[in-house]
Amino acid sequence: MPAKRSPARRPTMKDIARRAGVSESAVSFALNDRPGVSEVTRARVRRVAEQLGWRPSTAARALSGE
């Protein structure tokens, strides 16, 4: 019998924060173009998000009213 593989999990903001070495709120600020993080941090967060294949959750966006 072949081994059962679990489906790939979507990367989260927590994953990005851990990899970028910043807080989850800094990730949120950076990805939502809010003030409060430096341009260097914003660029690092976006680079990590791209490397991980992060995409905004449409369900989460709908809940936030955006």
Image: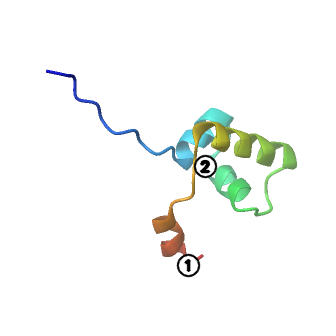
Outermost residue, left direction? 1
Q: Residue at x 86, y 49 (%)?
A: 39
Please name the residue that numbered disc 1 is placed on. 65
| Observer-nearest of 27 and 9 | 9
Q: Determine the residue positioned at 57% across, 53% down.
A: 55
Element carrying mark 1: loop
Tell me the quarter of the picture where residue 64 sits: bottom right
Is residue 58 left or right of 6 when viewed as pictured?
Answer: right
As helix, strand or loop, the secondary structure at mark 2 comes to helix
The answer to whether 27 is drawn above or below residue 18 in the figure is below
**Rendered-image quadrant of the C terminus:** bottom right
In primary-sequence order, the first of circles 2 and 1 is 2
The residue labelled by disc 2 is 24
Of all residues, the one furthest to the right in this rendering is 39
Q: Position of residue 19 (x, y in %)?
A: 62, 33
On the image, the x and y values in percent for residue 46 come to: 72, 46
The percent position of residue 18, horizontal first and vertical second, equals 59, 36
Residue 66 higher or lower than 37, as above or below: below
Q: What amino acid is found at the position of numbered circle 1 in the picture?
A: Gly
18 left or right of 2 in image: right
Q: For mark 1, does the 10 Å Cα neighbourhood hold few (<14), some (14 to 19), or many (20 or more) residues?
A: few
Residue flagged by tag 2: what amino acid is it?
Glu
